[in-house]
Image (cartoon, rainbow, N blue to C red):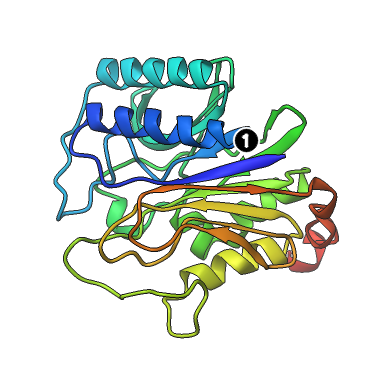
Amino acid sequence: MKIAVASPSYPSSLEDSIEQVKKLAKEAADQLAGIICFPESYLPGYPAPEYHPKKYTAEQLQLALDQVSEIAAACKIAIILPMDWYDDGQFLNVAHVISSKGEQLGFQSKNQLDPSEDAIWEAGTERKLFELNGLKFGITICHEGFRYPEATRWAAVRGAQVVFHPHFGASETQGPSLKEWGHKDNPYYEKAQMLRAMENTIYLATSNYASRFPESASAIIAPDGFCVAYQPYRLPGVTVAEIDLAMATGLLAKRFNPDLYL
């Protein structure tokens, strides 16, 4: 099975988000990927102070989701689409799952917000496991995957072979100048992603924006912690890799004994 992670540029508008999703989804599909994941809050763009994205209505966001569903069906590729979302009176940070037939299968909310996000979104309260074409997967969004390993383990102990990790770690004005994935001088983010894969014996597929100063790369990490593939820093595009689901045993996750920590 081939999976893909996207490294798009920061969008200039909701319409630009959709156009970049269309372009990169087609690129991934042309490389025979069965599913592609985009970065955190890609519709309309993560609300970092330097970017000032516009806030959209529930109707506008639903229309955007419908358009991406059409893209998934046209390209015959499943899409994990992180975006702003209104649900039952709440304003959430979510990742929608869309099948290769364009079916909207539900979403995973971001439940552990970064403290800086408390004034932006409300925290979700549920975790979900998804299955498409024999692939079982979970989703953990940014801060959850970096600082709350329980979020990744939740999916792994329930049979997830891959956890997708859309995140935002980007700036156009300041930050590190990364050259090598996982280098000892890089910020800790890539090392945390490697550990989420190793400590659960599953794949972790992580997607970040292509920015001038990224803090991590979009990458696909194997259950032994080996980085199978990553997108070069600062370069927009898609990273596609073939994964061996027989390696994703979830062995270490399944040996977890919660009774020892009560």
**Up-down relation of residue 116 to residue 40 (above or below):** below
Quadrant for residue 223, please give it: bottom right
Res 18 quadrant in image = top left
- Left or right of 14: which side holds 38? right
Dot 1 crowding, Cα within 10 Å, few <14, some 14–19, many 20+: some
Q: Residue at x 35, y 45 (%)?
A: 8
| Residue 81 seen in render | no
Q: Quadrant of the N terminus?
A: top right
For mark 1, what is the residue?
128
* For residue 189, side relative to residue 20 (left or right): right
Task: State the residue in front, 229 or 134.
Answer: 229
Q: Residue at coordinates 50% horizontally, 85% vertically from top-left?
A: 184
Is residue 148 positioned above or below 159 on the image?
below
Position of the C terminus by quadrant: bottom right
SS at circle 1: loop
Number of disc labels? 1
Left or right: residue 21 compared with residue 170 = right
- Location of residue 220 in the rendering, given as x and y in whole percent from the top left corner: 59, 55
Locate residue 98, reporting x and y percent: 53, 24
Q: Report which quarter residue 121 is drawn in.
A: top left
Please report the residue visible at 21 percent of the width from the left and 27 percent of the height from the top.
56
Seen from this angle, which residue lies furthest bottom?
A: 185
Residue 47: image location, x then y, percent? 23, 47
> Hey, what amino acid is under mark 1?
Lys
Q: Is residue 212 in view?
A: yes
Residue located 36% across and 54% down the image: 168
